[in-house]
Image (cartoon, rainbow, N blue to C red):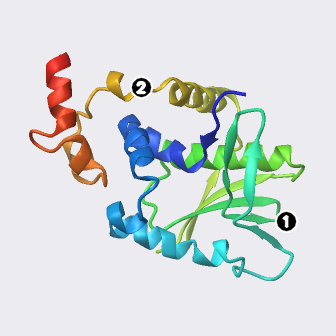
């Protein structure tokens, strides 16, 4: 089997492929070293799921580790409601359902399905305003795009990844000090190869 992809990194990759590299650099560090307040808040929001205290005993699978042999994925789910057969990914504040959110949910869906759980609905839940966003099951063009993203992740090489052109996006990135500081080692190395 090719190298496993962590489900949580799919959204990072789609935000910016270079973040995949920087995420791996920081993995051995304490989260406090690089997490900004949104990431710290997200960690707190997942505490009830991680501790298995979200809802009534037996109704929900919470924070379970999952694996997809078909796609080479590993990670955790947020919630699976066994009564309604709904897989739920919780986010702090959802303004729109980004492709990364959908693909993270697809990865969880395939993993749970392979484990024998009959997932019939996919939902992204925004915790701040308690809104629920239905996500269609993966098929057609969406499935093709999901599989293509996994292929690109496996083939990714930071040396070949161009700098993001959207500087507003970069300003909000927790890895910006490693990736784009004026005169940084990374920026100098790209200047020499250009």
N-term-proximal mark, 1 vs 2: 1
Q: Looking at the picture, does residue 124 appear above or below residue 49? A: above
- Residue linked to disc 2: 157
Residue 74: which numbered mark, if any? Answer: none
Image point 46% across, 26% down: which residue? 156
Residue 152 place in picture, x, y as percent: 51, 26
Residue 155 place in picture, x, y as percent: 51, 23
Residue lying farthest to the right in this orientation: 116
Q: Determine whether, in the image, residue 94 is placed left or right of residue 168.
A: right
Residue lying farthest to the left in this orientation: 183
Tell me how far mark 1 sits from mark 2, CA to CA.
Answer: 40 Å
Residue 43 place in picture, x, y as percent: 50, 70
Image point 66% across, 63% down: which residue? 78
- Residue linked to disc 1: 82
Q: Determine whether, in the image, residue 28 is placed left or right of residue 132.
A: left
Quadrant in the picture for residue 84: bottom right
Residue 97 place in picture, x, y as percent: 50, 51
Image point 70% across, 35% down: which residue? 72
**Disc 1 on helix, strand or loop?**
loop
Quadrant in the picture for residue 80: bottom right
Please indicate, yes or no, whether residue 88 appears anywhere in the rendered image.
yes
Q: How crowded is mark 1: few (under 14 residues within 10 Å), some or many (20 or more)?
A: some
């Amino acid at each position: 089997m090719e190298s496993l992809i962590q489900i949580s990194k799919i959204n990072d990759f789609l935000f910016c492929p270079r973040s995949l590299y920087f995420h791996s650099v920081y993995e051995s560090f304490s989260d406090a070293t690089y997490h900004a307040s949104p990431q710290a808040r997200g960690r707190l929001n997942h505490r009830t799921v991680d501790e298995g205290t979200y809802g009534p005993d037996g109704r929900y699978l919470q924070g379970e580790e999952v694996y997809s042999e078909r796609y080479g994925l590993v990670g955790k789910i947020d919630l699976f409601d066994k009564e309604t057969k709904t897989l739920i990914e919780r986010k702090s504040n959802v303004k729109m359902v980004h492709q990364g959110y959908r693909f993270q949910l697809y990865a969880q869906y395939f993993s749970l399905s392979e484990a024998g759980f009959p997932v019939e609905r996919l939902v992204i839940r925004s915790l701040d305003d308690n809104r629920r966003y239905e996500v269609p099951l993966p098929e057609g063009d969406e499935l093709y795009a999901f599989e293509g993203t996994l292929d690109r992740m496996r083939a990714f090489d930071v040396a070949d990844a161009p700098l993001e052109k959207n500087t507003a996006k970069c300003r909000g990135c927790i890895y910006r000090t490693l990736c784009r500081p004026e005169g940084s080692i990374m920026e100098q190395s790209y200047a020499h190869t250009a």
